[in-house]
Amino acid sequence: MSSADTANPSRHAARLMLMLLLAPALLWLLGLIVLPHVELGILSLRARVAPRVYEPSLAQFRTFIDEPLYWHTFMRTALMSMAATAITLLMAFPIAWTIAKLVKGRAKSLLFVMCLIPFWVSETVRTLGWMILLRESGVLPALLVWLGVTPAPVEMLYHDATILVGLVYTSMLFMVIPLISALESLDDALIEAAYDLGGNGWSILRQIIIPHAAPGIVAGCIVVFMLTLGNYLTPTLLGGKNSQWFTEQIYTQFITRFNWEQGAAFGFLLLGLSTAIVWVGLRLSGQKFGEVMQRS
């Protein structure tokens, strides 16, 4: 038997093993992502003309365009999500830099655990904690009265700033981790050489640190933006009935009005928005999606 003949069975066995290893992931993608999205796509492109009678239609998308409340909420959600992503990046970068470069040993582990602690409980518990802290009868308004800052307790819930605080808090870890991964691979000798050549802190940050950390920055921004854009619980609880968050509109169509066609159309509009903004971000940053996702 030739070497080629003995090599073929081994190749077939390797391919079979690879297929068996990939089968659970492929089944998960097919069953939980592909098929539900196909079904939502079918729902969004039909209209009910009679009980259990449907016909192809774009009426749901026309409803979105014709109703100012829907597209106003849509744009508000996009802008608030981008603002939350930018704030998260500005706050997470110093934290990631401190963990990756400035502390060592137990201090490094302790700081990382401190970032993880809020995620040891569910998002519901974290959000309710903010409500207890910020409501009119809560801890922070009472503290401000005790310090003489305000004459009476102030209601701090149900404001845009409160929603942003909650969104940043719930997504901070997803920005810190890719930034740490990117910054840890930066050679300290490059920074030392830049200082020796007369560079200052700003020029080193702009010309060395940020370009090196760009994949981690983009990865963190993508994950945080998608999580923020699709968040339902935090804007609803912290913003109240007037939060005007688009996921609340989707929930209303599906659960309250039982209008699955309209809810599916809204869901696809949100998916299209997130895809478009991520694509623009990748184009502007010059990053490739595959490389970026390796950092996340």
Image: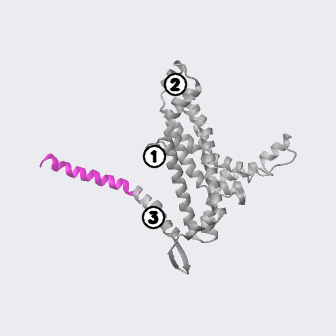
Please give left or right for residue 148 compared with residue 86 in the image: right
Q: Position of residue 63 (x, y in %)?
A: 60, 68
Q: Amino acid at mark 1?
A: Phe
Give above or below for 93 relative to 275.
above
Residue under the image location 58 percent in, 67 percent down: 62
Extreme-left residue of the structure: 1
User: Which of the numbered marks, if any, corresponds to residue 265?
Assistant: none
Q: Earlier in the sequence, mark 1 or mark 2?
A: 2
Q: In this figure, which residue is indicated by the disc labeled 3?
A: 35
Q: Amino acid at mark 3?
A: Leu
In the image shown, does 142 or 202 lie closer to the viewer? 202
Mark 3 is surrounded, within 10 Å at the Cα level, by few (under 14), some (14 to 19) or many (20 or more) other residues, namely few
Do callouts 3 and 2 mark residues in contact (Cβ within 8 Å)? no
Q: Earlier in the sequence, mark 1 or mark 3?
A: 3
Q: In this figure, which residue is indicated by the disc labeled 2?
A: 191
Q: Give the residues in magenta.
A: 1-24
Q: Secondary structure at mark 3?
A: helix
